[in-house]
Image: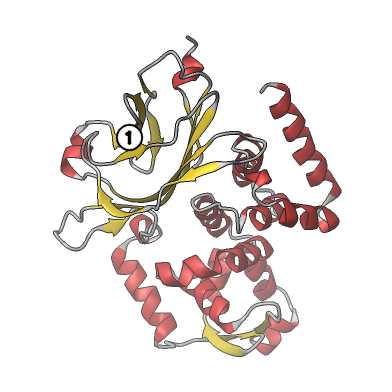
Amino acid sequence: MSDSAYRVETTSRLAQWKIENFASCTYRKSDPFKIGNWNWHLSVEKNRILSIKLYPEISNLTREQPPIASFIIRVLCSVGDRKALVHPGITDKPLKNNDDFVWMIGTPLTGKFIIDVEFLDLKAASPTGDEPYSIWGQGFIQKELNAAAIATLGRMLSESIHRDITINASDGSIGAHRAVLAARSPVFFSMFSHDLKEKELSTVNIPDMSIEVGQAFLSYIYGNIQHDQFFPHRLALLRAADKYDISDLKEACHESLLEDIDNKNVLERLHNASLYQLPKLERSCMRYLVKFGKIFDIQDDFNSFLQWADRELIAEIFHEILATWKGF
């Protein structure tokens, strides 16, 4: 039996195991696959009924910080018709060993089928004893900046200490400091270094940005953005990062947008990945749609997408479809 029989394909939050032929087996265990901080296994056992297990690989990390998982698991019985058996779903369940999640299926399965696991969240125990925290919702920015510098810059913004520039958003204004903006963005640096109206009037007009996004944008620039500011405005912040050439913000948005691709956002993510030249996001969206077969689940949305999407991007999608189907 080929190694591919045990391989699980993954994106950041999705795992799929294709079972080509299980008729002659009573038990099969997948190769390890990585989701979040942990390596995982799926197993299938056929006795009187079929049982499917999902569990983390035993390690020091698993013993010290066992994953607390929320996920949806499905069995897709055929790719074309997408007939599926769907588990009711798991929310915040600690998984330590191979008996913590067992799905007993009474319906007999014949021929090829796919086990599809979509992780909605993964939490780990806090080292300080606080409530478990989501590994996909942490303040990744603060980890890379000095706490004292963050606090100082944050006070400059929140307390309007010696502000000397005004940002006019579409529905409000925010005070800021031209030196900080110029240090973080070559576009702002150029504005304030030449005799442009922004330098003369001490204002920057950004009519395509809301005040909420503007506040999140400045909070990032000043190093004290919070997750609840960043997360809902990632696409708007991506546009601002591209416009003002702030590469680390663009990459932060890129990495975050990789983490929660789903049926509702994959086409918008794919469009923005192409527009802003985000290759990892584009590849992940393509794999989600084509390799994982999710394009079948959103056919109406995909047909609408074809009416307005970039022609080169559409050509890439169909090239991916042909390449995938050729190898199936």
In screen coordinates, is 306 left or right of 248?
right
Q: Which residue is mark 1?
A: 53
What count of labels does the image hold? Answer: 1
Q: Position of residue 146 (x, y in %)?
A: 32, 61
Q: Residue at x 17, y 63 (%)?
A: 130
In terms of image quadrants, where is residue 6? Answer: top left
User: Given the current orientation, which residue lies at the most extreme left position?
Assistant: 129
Give whichever of 286, 328 is nearer the camera. Answer: 328
Can residue 225 be seen in this snapshot?
no
In which quadrant is the C terminus drawn? Answer: top right
User: Given the current orientation, which residue lies at the most extreme top position?
Assistant: 1
Kind of residue at disc 1:
Lys
Q: Residue at x 78, y 45 (%)?
A: 313
Can residue 243 be seen in this snapshot?
yes
Q: Position of residue 201 (x, y in %)?
A: 68, 89
* Color theme of the render: secondary structure
Give whichever of 287, 274 is nearer the camera. Answer: 287
Task: Reply above or below: 49 against 130.
Answer: above
Count neighbours of disc 1 (C-alpha within 10 A) and say few if under 14, some if 14 to 19, many if 20 or more.
Answer: some
Q: Position of residue 282 (x, y in %)?
A: 65, 45
Task: Reply above or below: 14 against 175.
Answer: above
Q: Position of residue 98 (x, y in %)?
A: 24, 33
Task: Reply above or below: 19 against 214.
Answer: above
Q: Residue at x 27, y 31 (%)?
A: 57
Q: Residue at x 54, y 59 (%)?
A: 249
Give whichever of 224, 314 is nearer the camera. Answer: 314
Provide the secondary structure element on which disc 1 rests.
Answer: strand
